[in-house]
Amino acid sequence: MIEQWMIIPLAQPVITLNLNGVAILLILMALGGYAGYQQGMRNLLTLALWTIIAYITCVQGGDFIVGLINRIWVNAPRFAAFLIGNDPSLVPPLDPLITPGFQVPLFFRLIAFIALILLGMFFDSKAAWKGPPKERLARPLGLFVGALIALLWTNAAVVFWREFVNNGGILEGPIATLLNVLPDVSILLPSLIAIFFMILGLIILFNFPKVWKP
């Protein structure tokens, strides 16, 4: 009887877990949030800033940067007219400097994204504001920043992967399976990035007077 009792559990079918893309994304964010909670916000600040720069400039094909450059270039004559006291509305705008919709090739954007993240890690190791999370909100804010970094990295991989597939790329294996099920949350990231900078601005505002104390 004892031998039969020991054999029966081993004969049971293998237990499988079915996780959808949202659940996997939440798990990855939870891991990033846990790491951020342990380190505190100040220890992730440099990496978060470089990650946001990498995401804005590389993941979306540089649309934000191209649009910004074009707006500055197109409105430069009107701004110059305003500075010298003329009516800006009478000055015709320039044609866009860069063709709207211009896309940097995927390979170069991927390499640039990785390079910027590595630069962020390098400068993070030398950041002057790094230190133990002694402040009251250091760990909760670190949780948010850690989860945000994980979300940005994951969504960058999803966007790159989908563009790779749309261009005819083929890759199989567990990584491809994972990237296929992960959702694209690009629409949510501008708001989360804005919240991050709002938090950072409030921290700077409340701590700025301490800089001038003897």
Image (cartoon, rainbow, N blue to C red):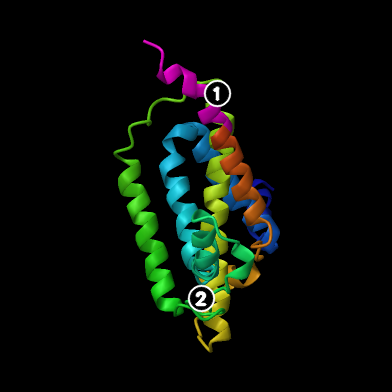
Assess whether residue 209 is covered by the magenta stretch. yes
Dividing the picture into quadrants, the one containing residue 86 is bottom right
Whether tag 2 and tag 1 are in contact, CB under 8 A, the answer is: no
Q: Does 172 sit above or below residue 175?
A: below
How busy is the neighbourhood of tag 2: few (under 14 within 10 Å), some, or many (20 plus)? few
Q: Residue at x 53, y 51 (%)?
A: 150
Residue 16 is at least partly visible in this image: no
Magenta region, main secondary structure: helix
Mark in the foreground, 2 or 1: 1
Residue sitting nearer the eye, 76 or 109 = 76
Q: Position of residue 189 (x, y in %)?
A: 63, 55
Amino acid on which disc 2 is placed: Gly
Q: Position of residue 126 (x, y in %)?
A: 29, 38
Q: Is residue 189 left or right of residue 150?
A: right
Q: Position of residue 211 (x, y in %)?
A: 41, 20
Q: Residue at x 45, y 40 (%)?
A: 45
* Quarter of the image where the C terminus is located: top left
Assess whether residue 138 is covered by the magenta stretch. no
Residue sitting nearer the eye, 203 or 73 = 73
Amino acid on which disc 1 is placed: Phe
Dividing the picture into quadrants, the one containing residue 15 is bottom right
Q: Secondary structure at mark 1?
A: helix
Please give the residue where the numbered disc 1 appears in the rendered image: 206
Badge 2 or badge 1: first in the primary sequence: 2
How busy is the neighbourhood of tag 1: few (under 14 within 10 Å), some, or many (20 plus)? few
Q: Does 120 sit above or below residue 73?
A: above
Residue sitting nearer the eye, 22 or 12 = 22
Q: Residue at x 41, y 17 (%)?
A: 212
Residue range highlighted in magenta: 202-214
